Amino acid sequence: MTLPFTHNPGRRERHLLRRHENPLFAWPPEAVAPERLLAAQKADHEEMVAFRESFADLVRRTAELPPDAGSELVLGIKQELEQHYEQCCGLPEDHERERAAVRRLIDVIMRTVQRYVGADPLAQQELDDERIAREVHFRLLEQPLVADLLHRESTIQPSELTPTLLSATPAEIDAACEIFDANQLAAIVDEAAALRARLADVALDLALNDAVWDRLNHALARVRGASTDH
């Protein structure tokens, strides 16, 4: 069945697209009902409209921060900006302009925070560590799968994690593997092996992408190696 999936879907529609007629999620493969797709598209659109209103208000409040704003207020605004960045990565359509605006505003706020800490080397190191962690986090969020996995109301159920990863693009799987620890990756690899065996029983061994399979095993070996080094 051909369904009217959109070109730049939101997080709800995106997961339905992963599931649609995908034997990794169910055998026999299940088609997404048209009414379910329309409901997901509607919910994604409503979330985008609400985001735009909330983001405009946040930008206004950031611009109106007084020069003598306390650290608690400034850090609260920064946290809201980071939350809006995460949210917009899961929305339909292209929101690079909003993401760029958030990055610029956070830079401005962090310069203010640096003035608070002055020449304290320990505080400066903590700010540097936070900046690096934020850059990594934002880099990972560029992959839609990571944005969907990390959303506080993720549409990806725990039981769907392995078929979701096995349906991912190479860039998505590489990024997603960075958010799991060794035990989590080991469980995913074990589930993937069991899934491959079940599909082989129904002559669907080709349903598992060997490149993705190799990436999962490579990521597990890398994380286990890092754990051993420490």
Image: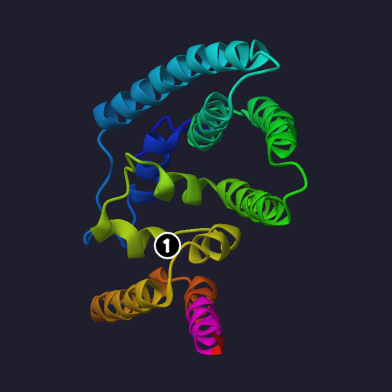
What residue appears at the point 56 percent right and 29 percent down from the top-left corner? 81
Q: Is residue 81 left or right of residue 108?
A: left
Name the quadrant of the N terminus: top left
What residue appears at the point 34 percent right and 65 percent down from the top-left corner? 162
Task: Give, as a single range, the part of the protein colored magenta.
Answer: 218-228
What residue appears at the point 24 percent right and 60 percent down from the top-left corner? 159
Q: Is residue 95 left or right of residue 5?
A: right
Residue 113, picture quadrant: top right
Question: As rendered, which of 101 and 191 lies closer to the eye?
Answer: 101
Question: Which residue type does callout 1 highlight?
Answer: Leu
Residue 98, picture quadrant: top right
Question: As rendered, which of 61 and 141 lies closer to the eye?
Answer: 61
Decide: is 151 above or below 54: below
Decide: is 98 above or below 184: above
Decide: is 12 above or below 49: below
Q: Where does residue 129 sit, x and y in percent of width and height? A: 65, 56
Residue 226, picture quadrant: bottom right
- Other-residue count near label 1 (Cα within 10 Å), few / some / many at <14 / 14–19 / ≥20: many
Q: Disc 1 designates what residue?
A: 165
Q: Secondary structure at mark 1?
A: helix
Q: Where does residue 92 sit, x and y in percent of width and height? A: 50, 29
Q: Main secondary structure of the magenta part?
A: helix
